[in-house]
Image (cartoon, rainbow, N blue to C red):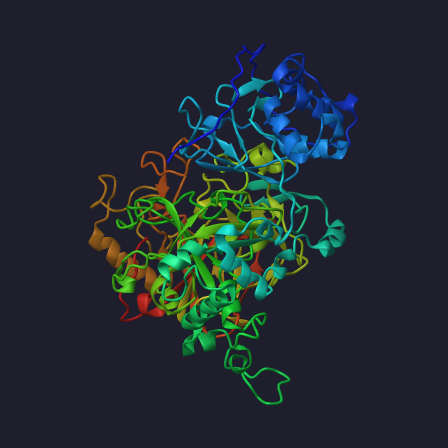
Amino acid sequence: MKHFFKASKLFYVSLLVSTHAVLTHSCNDDLPANSYYTFTGEMMSDYLKSREDFSLFKRIVERAGQMDFLASRGALTFFPPINSGVEKFLQEKGYASVEEIPASYCDTLVKACLVARTAFTYNFAQTQQENNTLDLPLIIQTSGDTVDANGMTLSIINRQAAIINELKNDSVENGVVHPVDRVLVPNTSLGSSLLDQKHDEYTIFYEALRRTALLDSLARYRDERYEISKNKYPAFRKEIWSGPQQYVAKRPDHRYEGFTLFIVPDRVLYEKYSQHFNENMTMDEKIDALYDLAVEKYGDDVSAQIFGLNEIVPGNHEGKTYKELYWNRNSLTNRHNPLNMFLSYHITDRLFESTAKLVNCWGVYTAVANPTEWINTLLDFSTLKLERVYSTIDPDVEHAAGYYLNHNHANLYNSYQRVRGAYLTQPDADNFSLNVAYFYIDDVLAYDQTMRNNIMNTRLRMDFYTLWPELTNNDMRLSGNPTQAYGPHDNSENGGEAGGYNYYLPSGYLKNTQVSENSIFFVQRQKVYWSSMHGDEINLLGTSYDVTFRLPNVPPGTYELRLGYPAMEDRGIAQIYLDGVPQGIPIDMRFRANDPRVGGLYNGLSGDRNSDESSNGIYTTKQLEENARTMKNNGFYSAPKSIFYNNDGTDAPRYSPSSCILQYNLADTYRRKICNVQIQPHTHHTVRVRSVFVQGNRGCLILDYLELVPIDICGAGGIGEDLY
């Protein structure tokens, strides 16, 4: 069904359409007005002044004291509302006129509709996320389901305002203007306030969250301890060398925390779990039914081991276990209670304001693999699978290129038993605030036997950017313009496009991670021209770096632990430890996969390897299969066929054989086996990386991605491993 927006049409001709500025501008309200450099052409201030249908918002800008700023040099994107939109805002808020709006709120409204870069609508993805100058998200959706009176597709911002098609992409000297039909009002609520406002569609889930006190756990937002300690570190670190490139790295401005809830609406429970739920039940009966469903999901013996349910509760003189003491309807607030566990698995420890942030799709060859992330939840010792599912991988998928949770296509490792998982949709309402977001899913989630034995019985590849929620919550992951290649902006405090900064993280910034004071934990901004997976990577630098972090949660069992990375001659060498025990010889990232120590067969550095698949290849499938065994005996694997680097010339993450290179064909990229890991139940395992050789200040170690592979897939007598 198509939705129609009624937008006012303005019939006028722009006085001047000029080339927008190419230099970025730093929004600093402390600058005096006379310090701004002003062009003689039409600026955003002139745009408002010369068009009568923006007279009301012009007055808001004047009352905010921001007109001089809109007259200054820069490269901005501006979403000003037309008069009818301001009138609706005044009516909804109960203001008789613009003059009654507090000046401080006027300032907020102006900053809410400004983005500190130039962005034209023809470059927008279907879901585009930008941050305004309040550092709050603007989620711009152009799906084709919402059209104007002329049947033209509309771009909707935060499900509030529509960009007016007849007026969009109007260039001015200091950027571009996209008029909208409503005032952009930022949602600055914290914690459960977002869910409190409207939960008519998920009353059961909401009440269960309230009774388990999980709503109260959503209050964390900004770490005030970091606000005090951060000034011990410089705002920028200069002359950071990673390989032959020099960088300037920014210290994070804040340390935010965030949460995303995957909520099952009432109608789904009534339809899919009719044996438990019906609309005529009382709320107490519905909560009891949800409790019973939770017991079904987590009542097995392996779950009890993973979550420590059979351990004796400390200080309990009766010697009762957690399960004996807390598996009842009177202990819903305890973290070991089944309903509490069930709901906790539906909450992540990071803020996904939109689907644009859910899964990193850059550099994934979707003809052979689905973009996939594995992330933590509030249920300790568990992992959730986020996946963008394509029909090329799962021909039975109902929503091609849709987002699914805990999905698995039929394959060799699950005995060809497909698991549909839960399909994710965005609510028809504001679904995010400062620290909480939520989506709807069409089935419940559980870290149960199906998840552990079927979905996770595969090669688990995890981008290092997903190991730490701080990288998502503080806008380091999937920020900036990934198609912007390395350039002067990487060696500048101004950063790249769309907030594309490189960061260094002070000691103590990352949870469950120890970083020595003489280490540089360097977070490179994403660049799809880099040969790392997704074009992003963590660099460990310093004269003697030493970093310890937790392994991601996986089911108990034996796994092969691998590290995937791009090699380069001036990398470093580091000793890897598992749970404090050194593993094998140090890892040396200075040689490529065609080095005798690896033994790989490669057609130069990037040419196609397989002559059976390409006329450019020089090795047969049989030769490469034999070579894979040789590499494996040496402790190495080629890079995957599902990962590519470079770009097809667009702003979309698409593969093109003429311009993109599969990592499988690249001698610079490969995987190194570190050791076998025996994952114990109810245990966090750690990895330590300690430098043993650096080359001056350039010998960094790359944390690109890790793999945990069940031994029955890759070990002796295993069923074999895919190349993707």
Up the image or down, 550 lies above or below 163; here it is below
Task: Determine which quarter of the picture holds residue 153.
Answer: top left
Q: Quadrant of the N terminus?
A: top left
Q: Position of residue 275 (x, y in %)?
A: 36, 66
Is residue 718 visible in the rendered image? The answer is yes
Is residue 66 visible in the rendered image? The answer is no
311 on left or right of 134:
left
Q: Position of residue 196 (x, y in %)?
A: 60, 52
Going 50% across and 74% down the picture, which residue do you hit?
307
The residue sitting at the bottom extreme is 318
Q: Position of residue 682 (x, y in %)?
A: 50, 74
672 on left or right of 312:
left
Up the image or down, 236 lies above or below 216; here it is above
46 on left or right of 678:
right
Q: Position of residue 623 (x, y in %)?
A: 22, 54
Q: Foreground: 2 or 242?
A: 2
Q: Foreground: 510 or 353?
A: 353
Q: Foreground: 711 or 400?
A: 400
Q: How many numbered discs sit on the rendered protein?
A: 0
The residue sitting at the front extreme is 280
